[in-house]
Image (cartoon, rainbow, N blue to C red):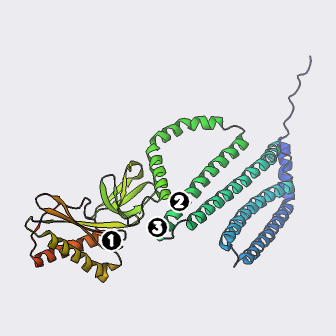
Amino acid sequence: MAQTEQAPQAPETAQGYQELITQVRTNWITAGLVLLIVAVGYWLALKALRRGFAAARARREGKDRAEQAIAYLSELERWLSGALKVLTLIAALTGVLWALQITRLTIVNNFFDLAYKKALSIGLIVFMSFLAKRALNFLVGNFASYYRRHTERSRDMDLRLKTLCAVLTGGGSAVIAVVAAFLILETLLESVGTVLASVGFLGIALGFGAQTLVRDLISGFFILLENQFAIGDGVRINDQWGTVERIGLRSITLRDGEGVAHLIPNGSITRVSNSTRGWSRAVVYAGVDYSGDPDKVLAALAQVGQEIRADPRFAGDILKDFEVSGPESFEDSVIYRIACPTVPARQWDIMREVRYRVWKTFAREGLPLKKGPGYSAPVQTQN
């Protein structure tokens, strides 16, 4: 009777594992020496790296665009230090496995085969991500420099530019990180189709739920980019008047004359009326009884304009002389108009002063002041 063939014996037998344990006990001194050599090499390489970059930064100080060059050198040093740590860990692991002669196990051989095949691809992906991040920082930095050269410097402009650069850098970095992560997963797993399919429905649901947020963010980005208004401006957003207190990517904080703060999502803004862009205008309408002498009324209004123009409190805020016109219209009273251009956000204080002096002057001159039409915009209180 023919004997049944025995199945091939697996290489990882009990005897093999016993030999492995014996090798570990025998070669632990060699493994310790390998770790010591790797640690010393890491310390020397890190010290040389830091000295080299310190010398490079010292040579750049005092030269053109030194700040940008020093920032680039610091970031490059940080990336190279991280890469050195990773290489040190790989060298330590490989050296210990070699010293202990553990590479005879099939599972270890398979691991090293996979690591050697994938390591180069992953390293290339990480390096390309670094280059993409540097290109992004370079483009954003040039955009900021161009914007500063072609825009008048101010605190609001610096805040707006800082916000824009943070948004561009953060958004671009997130895209680069996501793309790099998927490429690394594809390199390790050889296919991420199953993972993408499993999270596809979740992504669609989040997309529908976040469309309002995305609309707010996009609208806020263009508000900052186009400089539609700045902090401290008196504006009317949709139908709400107030002073801009905060500008964010998602919402605007508007504080009205009664001190109430209104939070308006950027995506809901359909119309913006800025009463403090470049220059403003103080306009006051005065109603006078029909019995009043028109020449005397016009002279009194002109006198009020001259007095306010000469007042040190308002002289620097008034750009041109007051214009007195009238009669503007015939209603319950004869309507006269006095107006002047002012610096931004100062028109309301000047309008209050004009009303006070008109009332006082008309009472002194015996002119019959009556109710007239109000100014088209509500009275604002500058915070």
- Side of 43 where 353 appears, left or right: left
Amino acid type, callout 1: Arg
- Which residue appears farthest toward the right when viewing the image? 2
Judging depth in this view, the residue of 218 and 208 nearest the camera is 218
Specify which label sits upstream in the sequence, 3 or 2: 3
* For the residues bearing labels 3 and 1, Cβ distance under 8 angstroms: no
Q: Which residue is mark 2?
A: 164
Q: Position of residue 109 (x, y in %)?
A: 83, 45
Q: CA distance from mark 2 to mark 1?
A: 29 Å
The residue that label 1 is drawn on is 346
Residue drawn at x 47%, y 39% is: 208
Helix, strand or loop status at disc 3: helix
Q: Is residue 261 above or below residue 181?
A: below
Disc nearer the start of the sequence (3/1): 3
Q: Give the total number of marks visible in the rendering.
A: 3
Q: Which residue is mark 3?
A: 156
Which x, y percent locates residue 32?
A: 82, 64
Look at the image and tell me in which quarter the C terminus lies: bottom left
Tag 1's secondary structure? loop
Q: Quadrant of the N terminus?
A: top right
- Please rate how many residues cluster around mark 3, counting C-alpha atoms within 10 Å: few if below 14, some from 14 to 19, many from 20: some
* Residue situated furthest left in the rendering: 291
Q: Are marks 2 and 1 in contact (CB under 8 Å)?
A: no
